[in-house]
Amino acid sequence: MNPYILATLLFGLGLGTTITFASSHWLLAWMGLEMNTLAIIPIMAHLHHPRAVEATTKYFLTQATAAAMLLFASTTNAWLTGQWDIQQMSHPLPVTMITLALALKIGLAPVHSWLPEVLQGLDLTTGLILSTWQKLAPFALLLQICPTNSTLLTMLGLTSTLVGGWGGLNQTQLRKILAYSSIAHLGWMILILQFSPSLTLLALFTYLIMTFSTFLVFKLNKSTNINALAISWAKATALTSLTPLILLSLGGLPPLTGFMPKWLILQELIKQELPATATLAALTALLSLYFYLRLSYAMTLTMSPNNLTGTTPWRLPSAQLTLPLALTTTSTLTLLPLTPAITAALNL
């Protein structure tokens, strides 16, 4: 793609998210989300591969549906209450509709079916943008309306953690596994949103760091399925020993960074006298942990000639910058000791 066109599209992507961040009026927020969607569509389809075009079409249709639903809900809110202000949402009907529209936008279960299919059709860089940056604007709106319908949010959260764990069990494609991982992490964030928005932000921040490092590792190895991952030890030996730790951090094992948000969320749920919800969420995390362990096993414990069938890759030097990978990997593995400082800063 022409660098000038790419720069314009990325600027549009950033501007759309910033407009949604800064808006207090529903029409402006909707406009920011639309700009965001329209800017990423050419980036998704730039490979001109049938799968990429199919993924782009699916993404466009789901995002257009969610945006139309959001606009309808905000108009209904203005009709019922006379308010266009995002933070003045008082009527339960538009709040529920907007929550569901934003759930469709970010890919929460049970409206998640588009996310694995879309992510599978994209290259890893665009998949990274879709899994990280595209979640920010809808989350900003969710944090602003802070829905009080606790049953809806708890059901969305638990369903997402369950589907995210269950769906990834049988996958061999890394992008689909990362999509289900994303659904599970978003479920944890939504689960705690009504009780502690700052904890949702912390969970989102750690999810962004961990997903960023995982995508960069797969991009450096040029791996898109488990077979390619199993023979990546020949390319980057040091990275092969670190990757299982990154995956286990995504799974939420101590003493890695990924344990911090899960630990604090379970603690908060128990404080709110929801031990059954906390137990269910912890059990669904085991499902996710299984497929991260499966990837770790394939990558480090199956060595030639006992590994999965695959051709040995060419050992060509990668042109990818390693500084972002180094920074995000360090953050993914070592931030747990900062938990007391973070909880103090966020008043948790």
Image (cartoon, rainbow, N blue to C red):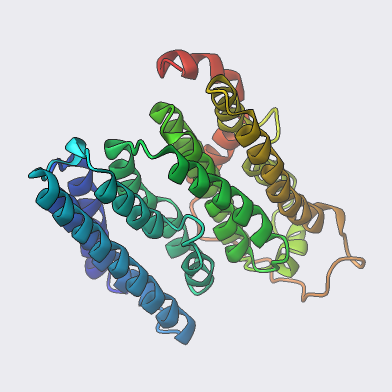
Quick one: 79 or 56, which is closer to the camera? Answer: 79
Tally the marks: 0
Horizontal and vertical percent position of residue 340 = 54, 14
Q: Is residue 323 visible?
A: no
Horizontal and vertical percent position of residue 84 = 11, 45
Q: Tell me the quadrant of the picture where the N terminus can be found.
A: bottom left
Residue drawn where x is 55% and y is 29% of the image: 265
Residue 260 is left or right of residue 41, and the answer is: right
Quadrant of res 294: bottom right
Give the farthest residue toward the bottom. 50
Vertical placement of 282 versus 179: above or below?
above
Vertical placement of 310 versus 94: above or below?
below
Residue drawn where x is 77% and y is 72% of the image: 312
Residue 242 is left or right of residue 124, and the answer is: right
Q: Can residue 71 be seen in this view?
A: yes
Quadrant of res 257: top right
Give the farthest residue toward the right. 306
Vertical placement of 124 versus 45: above or below?
above
Horizontal and vertical percent position of residue 326 = 55, 41
Residue drawn where x is 62% and y is 68% of the image: 224
Quick one: 109 or 51, which is closer to the camera? Answer: 109
Residue drawn where x is 20% and y is 36% of the image: 87
Quick one: 333 or 179, which is closer to the camera? Answer: 179
